Image (tube, rainbow, N blue to C red):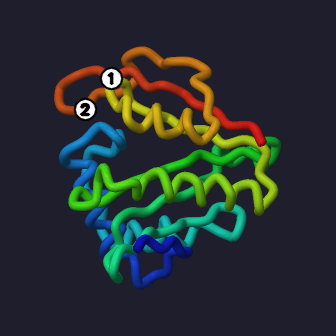
Amino acid sequence: MLTIRPASENDVSIITEIYNEAILNTVATFDTEVKSEVDRLKWLREHGNNHPVLVAEIKGKVAGFASLSRWSDRSAYDSTAETSLYVHKDFRKQGVGKQLLEVLVLEGENVGLHTLIARITDGNDQSIYLHERIGFTVIGTFREVGVKFGKYHDVHMLQKVY
């Protein structure tokens, strides 16, 4: 059974592990250098009530995490947040990402956000499909904006307006 709850500082180690695996092996993030637990703790503490970080657990093990982050430091954008979603490699394709994203979208609505933005690298069709199923719309594509693993990558922008 999967449960979703707010992340705590006790989750920083596994969040760091999940994120670093994505850095090293995927284009889900354009970070190219692994993060320390100190860095991820700082990241977690920068998220407040309006920008939750959630974890999904299966049988007491963290299977993934999702977050809403500030879209911009300019106050006119305060009702907009960017989504992030990462699933531990051992729990992928088991519905964890879908359930995390569904709860994350509800949390965004509950804290009064108006718009959610997702940036998804070209080729991650499963993530695009998942976001579209939850009500996001592809609003455009940035061509060749990131270099990872020696290749330029396009990034699709998706948006959900409540």
Residue located at (74% from left, 37% from top)? 161
**Which residue bears the numbered disc 2?**
148
Label 2 – label 1 distance at C-alpha: 7 Å
For the N terminus, the quadrant is bottom left
Image-quadrant location for residue 74: top right
Q: Which amino acid type is marked by label 1?
A: His
Tags 2 and 1 touching, CB below 8 Å? yes
Closest to the observer, 25 or 150: 25
Residue 8: x %, y % from top left: 49, 80
In the structure shown, which secondary structural element does the residue marked by tag 2 occupy? strand
Residue 123: x %, y % from top left: 32, 26
Residue located at (36% from left, 68% from top)? 15
In the structure shown, which secondary structural element does the residue marked by tag 1 occupy? strand
Residue sitting at the far front: 1
Residue 7: x %, y % from top left: 50, 75
Residue located at (51% from left, 71% from top)? 4
Closest to the observer, 78 or 99: 99
For the C terminus, the quadrant is top right
Residue sitting at the far top: 143
Instruction: Specify the label residue 49 is tagged with.
Output: none
Image-quadrant location for residue 59: bottom left
Local crowd at mark 2 within 10 Å, few (<14), some, or many (≥20)? some
Instruction: Specify the label residue 153 is tagged with.
Output: 1
